[in-house]
Image: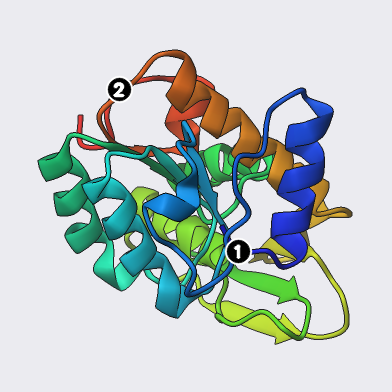
Amino acid sequence: MGFGKMGHAVREVALAQGHEIRAEIDIGQLTRESLRSAEVAIEFTQPDAAADNLIKLAGWKVPVVCGTTGWYGRLEEVRSSVETSQSALVYAPNFSLGVQFLLRAAREIGNALAQRPEFDAYLVDIHHRAKKDAPSGTAGAMQQVLRGADHTRAYPITSIRSGEVPGTHELHVEGPGESLTFQHVARDRTIFAAGAVTAARWLVERPRQGVFTLEQVLFGETDETG
């Protein structure tokens, strides 16, 4: 769902792994018939379309992987629809494995900084000029993880939108006489597509009900609330 750059990347990865593409649906074209009995949907559209798409898919009990960001203000509404319909959703601001490593590292960094007032820290996210949301969902997730471990800092985010950058995220830590930089650089959109296809396969191989994160797909299977 959504046939922009990410949609094309998902198509290439899925076909390369031997999956069948049952339907390619662009924004505004989603109907039950358009799904053509697909086992799972992968959604990369736009922030103003994603939540409504997810609610429709939940009502039809079609498991879905969503990589669109900028719609999380409606997350609880979507969650309620998924749970009421006993369907399944995997959502993530970033579907690369490396970003999941960075998020796990950020939690530990936040814990380490919590008792060190002499250090400052901030985030930078850099993306292509066409990206709709700023800060990125990944930067927001990093900020949330850091603040959860360290309540003493704001971890402000600077967003840059320029050129064709697929996505770069940085955590900067500044101390007296020293600096640390933790950086993830996406060189190709294929990494996001591969993660989304992995999550889709996870939903289909053993049917689940509920809302899940990519972290749970990769590292553990407890539901998001437990």
Q: Quadrant of the C terminus?
A: top left
Task: Find the distance from the CA under tag 1 to the CA under tag 2.
Answer: 29 Å
Find residue 116 and report its horizontal and vertical position in percent.
48, 55
Q: What amino acid does circle 2 point to?
A: Thr
Left or right relative to 203: residue 85: left
User: Looking at this view, is 51 or 178 the one in front?
Assistant: 51
Q: What amino acid does circle 1 point to?
A: Gly
Find residue 162 and report its horizontal and vertical position in percent.
82, 86
Find residue 26 and report its horizontal and vertical position in percent.
58, 67
**Label ID, residue 2:** 1
Q: Secondary structure at mark 2?
A: loop
User: Looking at this view, is 187 or 101 the one in front?
Assistant: 187
Q: Earlier in the sequence, mark 1 or mark 2?
A: 1
Determine crowd level at label 2: few under 14, some 14-19, many 20+ residues with C-alpha closer than 10 A. few
Residue 180 visible in the displayed image: no
Residue displayed at 17% across by 52% down: 81
Where is 141 relative to 92, above or below? below
Where is 80 relative to 172, above or below? above
User: Looking at this view, is 216 or 209 the one in front?
Assistant: 209
User: Looking at this view, is 208 or 36 the one in front?
Assistant: 36
Discs 1, 2 touching: Cβ within 8 Å = no
Left or right relative to 129: residue 78: left
Residue displayed at 78% across by 51% down: 9
Find residue 58 and report its horizontal and vertical position in percent.
27, 47
Q: How is the image coloured?
A: rainbow
Q: Nearer the viewer, mark 1 or mark 2?
A: 1
**Label ID, residue 222:** 2
Tally of numbered tags? 2
Q: Secondary structure at mark 1?
A: loop
- In terms of image quadrants, where is residue 161? bottom right
Residue displayed at 74% across by 74% down: 126
- In terms of image quadrants, where is residue 131? bottom right
